[in-house]
Amino acid sequence: MIAILHTWTREMRYHPHVHILATAGGWDPHSSVWRKPRNGGFLVSGRALSVIFRGKVRDALEKTDLRSQAPADAWRRKWVVHCQHAGNGRKVLRYIGRYVHRIAITNTRIERFHDGAVPLRYRDRASGKLRRTTLDAQTFIARFLQHVLPKGFKKIRFYGLFSSRQRKILEAVRQLHEEHPALVQGKTRELRAAKTNRAPRDSPPAHLCPRCLTGTLILVASLPRLRSNGRVPRGPPP
């Protein structure tokens, strides 16, 4: 998962929110395969995520003694969590590239500076039309500076598969994607073909070792999972 902090609106108002890019599936280290959701058209409920995210933020603020600075009604309101399919490959790069190294405003949106006034252009999100607004110099500077992050603050954070500690696993997933793209992308026809095209019995299927991720793991046998009836086993009578 990749999380990117974004603090401004198109008018440079303070609107902190986080853009998060998550994979639709995950790596199974026990079987060295990529696990996809059972329902290909659904990953997670945005409504459920909003409740969880609100609780996580509240708990994090409590650990740093900052909860008292947040409005009391913030924890009673519904938080907005928008979920959508970002696409694959270059489409994802274009989406995430809009937020990685951008600043609140660029010179191309500033029309001029005259008599202490700064007219600038922005595109209205609702109508999509190009609009103009004029700010005095002091307001313009104040709005811009509130989006300058503290020194050393990490705007982009990597979790799970994309963290620095999981580089070997990420390389294994990339290798799997290159050699068997159907197993990762979930294409129905290609996936069925990959499942039916089995190797001969004398050559068992090869998997990456879940520990070193470089060696070959040969499956000898699979033990069935034992089901417990809830009773404690007793020894034989004397």
Image (cartoon, grey):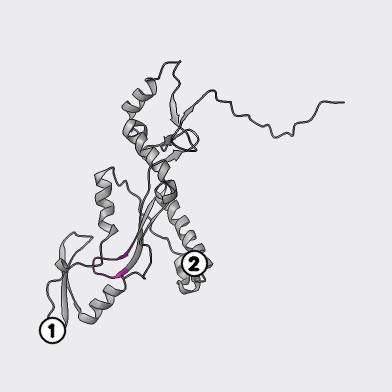
On the image, which quarter does residue 136 sit in? bottom left
Q: Quadrant of residue 37?
A: top left
Q: Residue at x 53, y 66 (%)?
A: 63
- Residue located 39% across and 24% down the image: 195
**Cα–Cα gap, marks 1 and 2:** 43 Å
Is residue 163 one of those drawn in magenta?
no
- Is-magenta flag for residue 7? yes
- Of residues 217 and 18, the one nearer the viewer is 217
User: Start and end of the magenta stretch?
Assistant: 5-14
Most foreground residue, 173 or 11: 173
Label 1 SS: loop
230 with respect to 79 (left or right): right
Rendered residue at 28%/77% (across/down): 142
Check whether the beta carbons of the residues at disc 1 and disc 2 lie within 8 A of each other.
no
User: Dot 2, crowdedness within 10 Å: few (<14), some or many (≥20)?
Assistant: some
Note whether 37 is above or below 73 in the view shown. above
Rendered location of residue 237, percent (x, y): 85, 26
Residue 148 located left or right of residue 167: left
Amino acid tagged 2 = Leu
The numbered dot on residue 115 is 1
- At numbered mark 2, what does the secondary structure look like: helix, strand or loop? helix
- Please give the label number shown on residue 61: 2
Quadrant location, the C terminus: top right
Task: Tell me the kind of residue under disc 1.
Answer: Asp
Q: Which one is in front, 208 or 51?
A: 208
